[in-house]
Each structure stands twice: as structure tokens, then as C-alpha cells.
Image: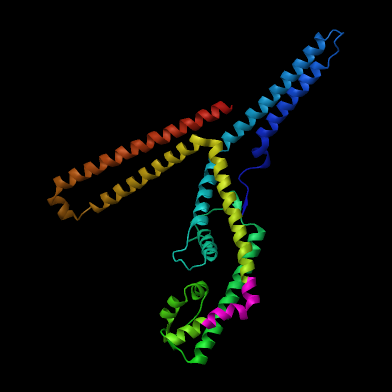
């Protein structure tokens, strides 16, 4: 993955500013100490102090300007932060079964969560601030091609062995697919019990056949292992960068970020509650005859639900107004 959350300038401007201030301070001290002892240095000292103060003032303006830029970028960084947290979830999802390929599981989930479910729907991962690297795409293509080749090879070799030795199958059509290529070696007995009906001697012979297969096809399996290891390193590197960018955003905005996310969650929760209350209200719209016979009861329920909706709407309105005035104040301060 390539991450473009922060520019080089955003990450280094404080180090640059403080380093420059330190260098200017040392240079000013050295310049003052090297002034001629036997001459009138009052004018030189004055000029030196003015230049030093002016440089520090410019550095201060630069730092304040960059800090304001950080604040102005808050809402964009917040959305990127949420996207990074979703991406981190994908990195840390584990396979349901012990013998499933974790790398294949990661690639499958990443593809699924970046695909639109409909033309108007947004994918779970929107690639805001990060994207696939060319190296990852190339390795993924090689990996997909190789696991297909290995799966086809296993399917042919296993079915040929079964046909040659006339082994009894538990299933009508036995296929060794990409999901079986790990389990067939790591949990051979379970795989056999699910697909074949063998005697003890046949199980031992079939297990021996499987153990010999990687040695007979060592170039194929070695290539598969090499590509998998390279892709796993690329995945782990992206995982570390994802967590690093999350920490940077948290350090940059701190409580401001967490409070904004909490307010957003409260608003979403309130809107969901209002939606549920409206659904309850719809369910109370009964037939005319039943409505007439239960007018009092229905009126009480309607009034109760209406009060609850009003209460929720008032809460949402107050929170939206608070956010609006907060944004308004920020714009006034910027001016």
C-alpha cells in the first residue's frame, strides 16, 4: 500500500523550524562573542539582536501558519482516519479456520471491501489517502496465477492417484480447489475423512503420496513459497504504515479528534433511534374500523411516540447547532 496522508512538509516542518531557531541562536551567540573588544560594539550588538528577534518572529509566524493549516485540514484528516481504521480491521482479520491461507484471506477481504455493491453505494474502503502500490499489484497477480497453477496441479495429481488406485470416494465429484491446498497437507486425516472412504493401509499410502508430492514438484512449490513470502512482507509493511499513520493523526489532533468522533457517533445513534420510532409509528397505523374502536389507546400511543421523536429531534438540533457555531467560530478566528 502507498499512503499519502501527510506531505513531507507536514511531517518535518516543526523539526525544520526548531532546528533553524537553534542554529540561529548559536550563530548569534558566536557572532556576539566575536565582536571586537576594543571598539564600540553597541551598534553591532543592536543590529545583531534585531536580526535575531526578526528571524525568531518569522519562524514563529511560520509555525503558527502551519498549525492553522493543520486545523483547517482536521475534517479531511478525520475522514482519512476513519478510512485507515477500517483498513486496519482488514489487515487484522484472521481466517475462520486454522488451516486456511491467511494471505489469501487478506487479499479476498480487501477485494471484497473495495468493491461497490451497487452503482450508487460507496465501498467500505474508499482509498482516501492510500492506494495500491505497483509492487503489491504485481505480486498479487503473480500470487493468484501461482495458486491457481498449484491448485490445478494438486487436483490432477490427487484425482489421478485416486483413479489409478481405485480408491472409494465420499463425494461424487472430488475437486482439490484453492481452499484445500493448505488443509490437504496440514490436516490430511480430516481432509481424507471428508472426501474419501479408505482403509488404514490406504490412508497411510495416500498420506505418503501427499508427502512426496512437494518433493517431486519442488520447483513449483518453491516458487509458490517465494511469491507468498514476498507478498506477505509487502502486506506486513502496509500494516505497519497503516498503524503509523493512525498514530500520527491521533498525536496531531488528540482529544479534538476523539470528541468529534464521539459526537458523530451520538448523532448517528439519534438518527437511528428516530428512524426506529418512525417505523413503530407506521406499525400503529391500523385499519379504520380498528382505529375507531381503539381511538383513545391509539391516541395515547401516538402522543407518546410523538413526544419521544420531538425529544430526539431537539437533542439532534442542539448538537448540530453546537457544531455549526464551533465551525463558525473557527472561520472567524482564521479571518
Q: Position of residue 107 (x, y in %)?
A: 55, 63
What secondary structure prevails in the magenta region? helix
Who's the residue at 47% across and 63% down the image?
Answer: 95
Vertical order, 143 against 60 (above or below): below
Looking at the picture, tell me which residue is in the foreground, 231 or 112. Answer: 231
- Residue 141 visible? The answer is no
* Image quarter in which the N terminus is found: bottom right
Who's the residue at 33% across and 46% down the image?
Answer: 273
* Image quarter in which the C terminus is found: top right
Q: Position of residue 308 (x, y in %)?
A: 27, 41
**Number of marks present in the image shown:** 0
Vertical order, 237 against 185 (above or below): above
Vertical order, 84 against 39 (above or below): below
Does residue 72 appear left or right of residue 51 in this picture? left
Is 48 contained in the magenta span? no
Residue that lies at the very extreme toward the left in this rendered image = 293
**In which quadrant of the rendered view does residue 73 lie?**
top right
Q: Position of residue 324 (x, y in %)?
A: 46, 33
Q: Which residues are magenta?
A: 208-223
Who's the residue at 64% across and 72% down the image?
Answer: 222
- Residue 317 visible? The answer is yes
Looking at the picture, tell me which residue is in the foreground, 78 or 164. Answer: 164
**What colour scheme governs how the chains and residues are painted in the rendered image of this protein?**
rainbow
Does residue 272 appear left or right of residue 127 in this picture? left
Who's the residue at 53% across and 87% down the image?
Answer: 161
Does residue 278 appear left or right of residue 114 in this picture? left
Q: Position of residue 60 (x, y in %)?
A: 66, 25
Is 216 contained in the magenta span? yes
Amino acid at each position: 500500500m502507498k499512503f499519502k496522508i501527510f506531505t513531507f512538509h507536514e511531517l518535518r516542518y516543526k523539526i525544520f523550524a526548531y532546528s533553524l531557531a537553534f542554529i540561529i541562536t548559536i550563530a548569534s551567540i558566536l557572532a556576539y562573542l566575536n565582536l571586537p573588544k576594543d571598539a564600540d560594539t553597541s551598534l553591532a550588538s543592536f543590529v545583531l539582536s534585531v536580526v535575531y528577534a526578526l528571524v525568531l518572529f518569522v519562524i514563529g509566524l511560520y509555525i503558527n501558519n502551519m498549525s492553522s493549516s493543520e486545523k483547517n485540514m482536521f475534517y479531511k484528516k478525520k475522514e482519512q482516519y476513519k478510512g485507515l481504521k477500517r483498513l486496519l480491521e482488514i489487515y487484522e482479520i484472521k481466517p475462520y479456520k486454522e488451516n486456511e491461507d491467511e494471505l489469501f484471506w487478506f487479499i479476498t477481504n480487501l477485494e471484497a471491501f473495495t468493491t461497490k455493491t451497487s452503482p450508487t453505494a460507496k465501498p467500505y474502503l474508499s482509498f482516501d489517502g492510500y492506494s495500491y502500490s505497483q509492487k503489491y499489484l504485481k505480486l498479487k497477480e503473480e500470487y493468484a496465477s501461482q495458486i491457481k497453477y498449484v491448485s490445478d496441479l494438486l487436483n490432477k495429481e490427487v484425482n489421478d492417484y485416486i483413479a489409478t488406485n481405485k480408491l472409494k470416494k465420499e463425494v461424487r465429484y472430488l475437486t482439490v480447489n484453492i481452499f484445500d491446498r493448505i488443509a490437504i497437507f496440514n490436516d490430511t486425516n480430516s481432509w481424507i475423512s471428508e472426501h474419501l472412504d479408505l482403509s488404514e493401509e490406504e490412508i497411510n499410502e495416500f498420506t505418503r503420496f501427499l508427502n512426496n508430492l512437494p518433493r517431486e514438484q519442488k520447483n513449483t512449490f518453491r516458487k509458490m513459497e517465494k511469491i507468498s513470502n514476498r507478498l506477505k512482507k509487502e502486506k506486513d509493511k502496509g500494516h505497519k504504515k497503516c498503524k503509523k499513520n493512525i498514530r500520527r493523526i491521533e498525536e496531531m489532533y488528540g482529544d479534538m479528534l476523539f470528541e468529534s468522533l464521539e459526537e458523530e457517533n451520538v448523532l448517528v445513534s439519534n438518527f437511528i433511534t428516530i428512524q426506529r420510532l418512525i417505523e413503530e409509528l407506521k406499525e400503529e397505523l391500523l385499519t379504520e374500523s380498528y382505529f375507531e374502536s381503539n381511538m383513545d389507546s391509539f391516541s395515547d400511543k401516538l402522543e407518546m411516540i410523538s413526544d419521544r421523536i420531538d425529544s430526539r429531534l431537539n437533542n439532534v438540533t442542539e448538537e448540530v447547532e453546537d457544531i455549526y457555531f464551533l465551525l463558525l467560530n473557527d472561520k472567524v478566528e482564521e479571518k
